[in-house]
Amino acid sequence: MPSDSTALSYAVAPRLEARGLPGHVAIIMDGNGRWASGRGLPRLEGHRRGVDAVRRAVRTAIDLGIRHLTVYGFSAENWRRPPEEVADLFGLLKRFIRVDLAQLHANNVRVTVIGDRRPLSEDICTLLREAEELTAGNGGLNLVVAFNYGGRQEIVQAIRRIAHQVRAGLIDPDAIDMATVEAALDTRGIPDPDLVIRTSGEMRVSNFLPWQTAYAEFVFLPDLWPDFDDATFRAAIEEFQLRDRRFGGRSPEAR
């Protein structure tokens, strides 16, 4: 098993033809526990291998010239898991930031964190803030980490923000439109995902970016997340490139 001291390099390979590539890929990383149990290993080992898969995904995104990569690191519903597993997940997040942040920064990666930080411990919040501040000026890949994130919860929070603005007389209720809502979301300023990938064979969105993925293409893969590699990522991209994206319109070929 690769240890933290053998974190994968993020060296940039020659970029592929950008035409037809998604600008924003979002990934629901599923299957760590099943990967571990299928090998008679503790769940923590599955989560550790899942961190290695995140490193590979970031490297591929950089190689391909993808502008935004969002990973579903910890959902608002994950608090229902046993406390020891939650603690393990938080520990892995800490180690990932401490081990990989310098390498991400050196490769011009910007780190953005979305989700509700209020229930998080101060040490976690400090690490997340440091990662964002250190990389804020970077212009390469935007790595968006959805941590303690829930899509419905995000929309509720956005409604509250807008309601406060209405009460303060800053917004006319009749002037509220989609742009108003988007500006109140955690993802404000980030383009909507073009492609959503979910691993492990499950075919649901699990409260992940429901507003932002209204017109995204979905690719559901049978692979468990720790097995996700460069070839798997590129295969999902190729599937995306075969899709006919109409955004509610009609293909030019249609009559």
Image: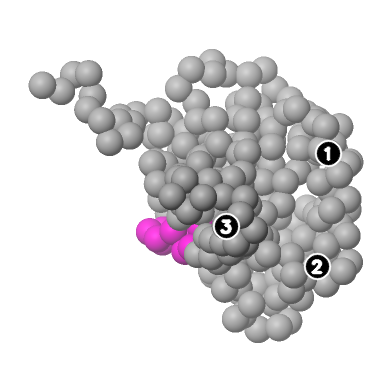
What amino acid is found at the position of numbered circle 3 in the picture? Answer: Val
Q: Where in the figure is residue 197, as x and y percent of width and height?
A: 48, 47
Tell me the CA gap for discs 3 and 2. Answer: 40 Å
Q: Residue beneath label 2, please?
A: 91
In magenta, the rendered stretch is 199-208
- Badge 1 element: helix
- Any part of residue 124 in sight: yes
- 207 relative position to 255: left or right: right
Q: CA distance from mark 1 to mark 3?
A: 34 Å
| Left or right of 14 on screen, residue 218 | left
Q: Nearer the viewer, residue 143 or 191?
A: 191
**Residue at image x 56%, y 50%?**
171
**Residue annotated with mark 3:** 166
Q: Amino acid at mark 2?
A: Gly
Above/below status of 84 relative to 133: below
Please count the marks in the image. Answer: 3
Category of crowding for the residue at label 3, using alpha-carbon neighbours closer than 10 angstroms: few (below 14), some (14–19), many (at least 20): some
Q: Residue at x 48, y 53 (%)?
A: 173
Do labels 3 and 2 touch, CB within 8 Å? no
Judge depth for marks 1 and 3 and give the one in front. Answer: 3
- Main SS, magenta region, reads loop
Q: Which residue is mark 1?
A: 135
Quadrant location of residue 87? bottom right
Within the magenta stretch, is there residue 205?
A: yes
- Tell me which amino acid carries mark 1: Thr
Q: Position of residue 124 (x, y in %)?
A: 83, 64
Give the mark nearest the N terminus, 1 or 3.
Answer: 1
Q: Secondary structure at mark 3?
A: helix
Crowd around label 1: few <14 · some 14–19 · many ≥20 (10 Å): many
